[in-house]
Amino acid sequence: MNLHEYQGKLLFAEYNLPVSRGKVIFDAKDAIDACDEIGGDKWVVKAQVHAGGRGKSGGVQLIDNPEQAIEFAQKWLGNRLITYQTDAFGQIVNSILIEECTDISQELYLSAVIDRDTQKIVFIGSSEGGVNIEEVAKNSPEKIIYQGIDLDNLNNQEDAISIAKVLRLDDVQTKQFIPMIENLLRLFVEKDLCLLEINPLVINKNGDLHCLDAKINIDSNALYRPVSYTHLTLPTKA
Ligand code: ADP
Ligand code: MG
């Protein structure tokens, strides 16, 4: 089962991973209140569908006026968004995530999947984020690391450090990255994920790591567990 970005970010927040202040709306009339509650003078509005590529298809927009959030919501709610990851009919947009705007200095790629052959969780990392990772894999495979994690030795920081090197993180960012990998692993195992993708994981203008997108797929065999992912609300205060 795929989660929406806002649901994924709620889980990230629960696991102490850095996400943006934000609010999800299901009705255009709630757009201004959401912007007010988040605060600031620039926001990003994001159509929630189970597909990436929204940025290139008009499904993610930077705005500097809450009126534009209403326009964006009126344009997309109830309509279909087509991206290169959807079929030709696209996907219906039922909710919009409004979040604070992050000043980005670099976009990186990080994901985790299960490798059935080695029975390990494998992290995939690249310094080339925000783009189609398949293209990077084809054109510059040396920029991608596939790091299997030894689940019997979760306190081993070497794996995180190896990934940090390929992401070209400095010492301060590497110190942030090590607990980030620990938290992502806990999330992955405790919530029975089969895929987790942060594209982009960014370095913001302060030099800190920040999760700007969230794609999560939960193993369907685990859905009997009594967990609801829809009741959660994103933090709107710092
Ligand atoms: P998708 O993967 O569907 O295109 P993303 O969430 O990755 O959607 O957003 C696309 C791009 O929009 C990102 O690579 C980033 O450059 C920008 N972006 C997304 N969210 C924010 C934000 N909160 N602040 C600033 N820029 C953002
Ligand atoms: Mg993305």
Image (cartoon, grey):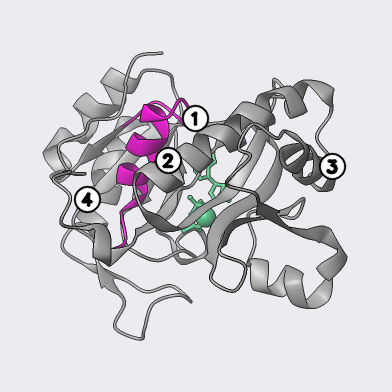
Q: Residue furthest bottom?
A: 88
In this view, the residue in front, 70 or 208, is: 208
Of tags 4 and 3, the one toward the viewer is 3
Picture coordinates of residue 67, whole percent (x, y): 28, 36
Q: Looking at numbered disc 2 in the image, what kind of residue is underneath it? A: Leu
Of tags 1 and 2, the one toward the viewer is 2
**Residue under numbered circle 2:** 187
Q: Looking at numbered disc 1 in the image, what kind of residue is underneath it? A: Leu
Residue 178 tag number: none
Q: Earlier in the sequence, mark 3 or mark 2?
A: 3
> Quick check: can you spot residue 68?
no
**Residue under numbered circle 4:** 95
Of tags 4 and 1, the one toward the viewer is 1
**Residue under numbered circle 1:** 17
Picture coordinates of residue 18, whole percent (x, y): 51, 28
| Image quadrant containing the N terminus | bottom left
Residue that appears at 82% across and 75% down: 139
Distance from disc 4 to disc 1, alpha carbons, whole Å, reads: 23 Å
Label 2: how many Cα within 10 Å (few below 14, some 14–19, many 20+): some
Number of marks:
4
Verify CB contact (< 8 Å) between mark 1 and mark 2: yes
| In this rendering, position of residue 16 left or right of residue 142 | left
Range of magenta residues: 1-22
**Residue under numbered circle 3:** 165
Verify CB contact (< 8 Å) between mark 4 and mark 2: no
In the image, is residue 231 part of the stretch drawn in magenta?
no
Q: Earlier in the sequence, mark 4 or mark 3?
A: 4
Distance from disc 4 to disc 3, alpha carbons, whole Å, reads: 37 Å
Q: Is residue 16 above or below residue 25?
A: above
Label 3: how many Cα within 10 Å (few below 14, some 14–19, many 20+): some
Picture coordinates of residue 155, whole percent (x, y): 64, 31
Q: Secondary structure at mark 2?
A: helix
